[in-house]
Image (cartoon, rainbow, N blue to C red):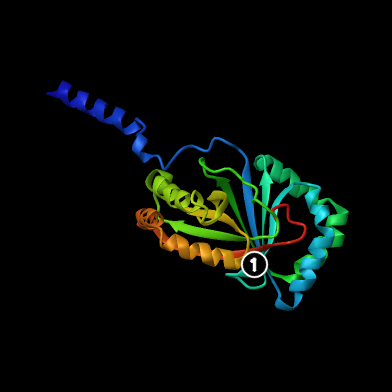
Amino acid sequence: MLKLWSSLLRSAAAAAVKPHANLSTGPQQKHKTFYEFRTYCIHPDQNAAFLKLTNDKIHLRTAHSELIGYWSVEYGGLNQVFHIWKYDDYSQRAAVRAALAQDPSWVSEYLSKAMPMLTSQDNEVTYLVPWSSLQQPPQEGGVYELASYQMRPGGPAVWGKPFQAAVTAHDAPGYAKLVGVFHSEFGQLNRVHALWWFKSPDQRAELRQKAHNDARVVAAVRNSFVHLDSQKNKLLCPCPFSPLK
């Protein structure tokens, strides 16, 4: 009896340390490259001045790292700008931040003037989801929609496929042009962002109405909706100096 009990204890201990695949929340991140989302809120009477200063001095910042896009928020947030920066890894970002702090032109010509114009700053570290890559819009001069989804805990292993199906149901028929899908690493967790491009706000309204009448879209959205806690969106207008226009 004692031998049997000892054997059971050893089996239980082995099971306790054995990894379980079903505990995984999704595929491991294969690439070090990440995208920092930044949102700045501006004093209402300083909005125009901030945009002009940034337009004139952004070259001081892009000399240090790659800017993906810089937008003014038109709907979904007042007196805000949203921008995306690309980094190869965390070490590169740390080196960039250190270099900026020691750059006298950046500090004196931009930072010292811009900071008093802001009411708040927020950032979020994101990765592209495994099935998405960063795409260029078909032409310049359009608008962008940043749709942000707060998913229920569980990770892509739970909601990944239904969410991908819902995105594809909009992208494949041409109801919107997908620029990229990102998931959060630092900031609010279990958040996914889809960045879309449209020719104009009116085209977005027209295509959205068509999508609502497409049974394939409706079915895909319903299947993913059960994994969703909340969502919000912003309509973004690219600044003249934004690489994504």
Read off the residue under disc 1: 73
Label 1, residues with CA under 10 Å away: few <14, some 14-19, many ≥20: many
Closest to the observer: 12 or 75?
75
- Above or below, 3 against 13 in this view is above
Question: Which residue occupies 77% across, 60% down?
Answer: 240
Q: Position of residue 154 (x, y in %)?
A: 39, 49
Picture residue at 73% right of the left edge, 61% below the top = 239
Q: Is residue 66 visible?
A: yes
Q: Residue furthest left?
A: 1
Name the residue located 63 percent from the left edge and 40 percent from the top edge. 33
Determine whether, in the image, residue 227 is placed left or right of residue 199.
Answer: left
Residue 26, compared with residue 83, is above or below; it is: above
Q: Give percent across and percent down for residue 5.
A: 17, 26
Residue positioned most to the bottom: 45
- 105 or 215: nearer the viewer: 215
Q: Residue furthest top?
A: 3
Residue 112's quadrant in the figure? bottom right
Residue drawn at point x = 37 percent, y = 46 percent:
158
Does residue 155 show up?
Answer: no
The amino acid type found where label 1 is placed reads Val
Q: Position of residue 65 (x, y in %)?
A: 75, 46
Q: Secondary structure at mark 1?
A: strand
Q: On the rendered image, what quadrant is the N terminus found in?
A: top left
Q: Is residue 195 left or right of residue 2?
A: right
Q: Is residue 3 left or right of residue 96?
A: left
